[in-house]
Amino acid sequence: MSKDLIISLSDSEISIALLEEKQLVELNKEKRNVQFSVGDIYLGKVKKIMPGLNAAFINVGFEKDAFLHYLDLGAQFKTLHHYYNLATQNRGRLPAVSKFKSEPDIDKEGKISDVLTTGQTVIVQITKEPISTKGPRLASEVSIAGRNLVLMPFSDKVSVSSKIENADERNRLRMLIQSIKPKNYGVIVRTVAEGKKVAILDVELKELINRWETALYAIRKDTKTPKLLVGERNRTTTILRDILNPDFSNVIVDDEVMAADIRSYIREIAPEKEKIVKLYKEQVHIFDHFGVSRQIKGLFGRTISFKGGSYLIIEHTEALHVIDVNSGNRSKSGNDQEANALSVNQEAAREISRQLRLRDMGGIIVIDFIDMQSNENRQALFESMKELMSEDRAKHNILPLSKFGLMQITRQRVRPEMTISTDEKCPVCRGEGKIGPTVLLTDEIERRLVQILERVKTSRLLLRVHPFVAAYLKEGLFSVIGKINKKYKVSIKVQGSLSYHFLEYCFFDRQGNEIDLS
């Protein structure tokens, strides 16, 4: 399966689209000044103890306090906290983590008030980003993820991904890591490490240990809280780290600096894949060129059509997500009702698995499939859904169909759900409820051009409009845009963009910078 990563940068955000066989399966939008990402490690301060919840609220710098449950402290919380105190109070030589004597594990049935006190400084890691009215969710059992390994300080366990099925390979990796890891460091071996040589894993392990110990030494210089200790890499490199594999065909970026950064990162983790990074230089927006904009419009609405005229209706509530499967025109086909229901349900399962990844829907998902009487067909649908969801990197659990034909799925929620409004303003009134004279659009464009020419000394411009308007402006030997070019002695290139409303337009210079007169 070919995979392409399409990356678009604007002044305010980075948009990342993952295509599998040219089909959009994941979409990430990240603000360029994003904070409190999953994986970030902070130095926080206990704000309030909640004995009834056996939890505490921690100030990590977000507008709402973050939530830390007792069960998320980690067995070695006392060791971590003792080492932190040693780092901040003892100005002498700080002992290496590997030579530090561990404290006893905390009691699994203990109380939060036995371990934490108000005002105490703690090292915590974000496990869920702020969602809706809630602050971040935290854990104190910290980990630092790399391409092949995940480092867990103050643990001694070595675990191997369950997705590596070969028993000999699992044993090889476990023994290999046991032989190279220092004491007081636990390691999780990721799926991508299968078949890797010891030299590659040893280099990565040393890099992860260095990141952690550098952060600990930095605490000694600055103990103020809240403070970011170890930041996750940006969303682009995190996605590359987690999903880069031999199937990746292209990573296409429309920004030269970002392309260089990604090329440098791939050179570190997979030198043989460096050539897949390509810089996009065309004038047409990168998402329009690769068909991403069109797919976004078709995949983020309330109603999603799929093969054969069937469709899904997706509703979101505070408690759960509900998906209703409808056969549409398929109900008129010549097959018997049971076979038709199975066919529609299996196609729906394929689209639903895609939608869950695309929208990053988390929590409880309830799917109302078309009723089927045969137990064999119900089981076949369940097995089909499990297979389709096996490509999903988020942790999930799928239950068989209930007697009411409902399937329940729980899916890990770590970030706010991706929501994109696909509704467009009325092309006539622009959402104001008043009709403007559309025949005067060319006059309006011409007036804006005059204003630009008065303020900006240039004769080469790019005009982006809806494709229908672009076709009108360029039509004929003596086109409208040709007359304007001749009249004002300029060279205006007209470009159609599907992301524009019918009467929307914008002028750019030839370097692609928008000309804003406001």
Image (cartoon, helix red, strand yellow):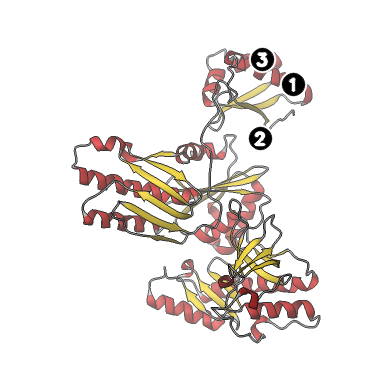
Q: Nearer the viewer, mark 1 or mark 2?
A: 1
Counting from the top left corner in percent of width and height, residue 101 is at 65, 87
Identify the amino acid type marked 3.
Lys
Q: Which residue is painted at 59% across and 63% down in the image? A: 268
Q: Is residue 365 left or right of residue 273?
A: left
Q: Which residue is painted at 67% across and 26% down in the image? A: 461
Residue farthest to the front?
52
Q: Is residue 206 left or right of residue 406?
A: right
Q: CA distance from mark 1 to mark 2?
A: 19 Å
Identify the amino acid type marked 1.
Gln
Counting from the top left corner in percent of width and height, residue 467 is at 52, 26
Counting from the top left corner in percent of width and height, residue 451 is at 74, 21
Note whether residue 3 is visible: no
Circle 1: element type = helix
Q: Which residue is mark 1?
A: 451
Q: Which residue is mark 3?
A: 486
Q: Residues within 10 Å of mark 1 (few under 14, many from 20)?
A: few
Q: Is 498 situated above or below 151? A: above
Q: Which residue is mark 2?
A: 512
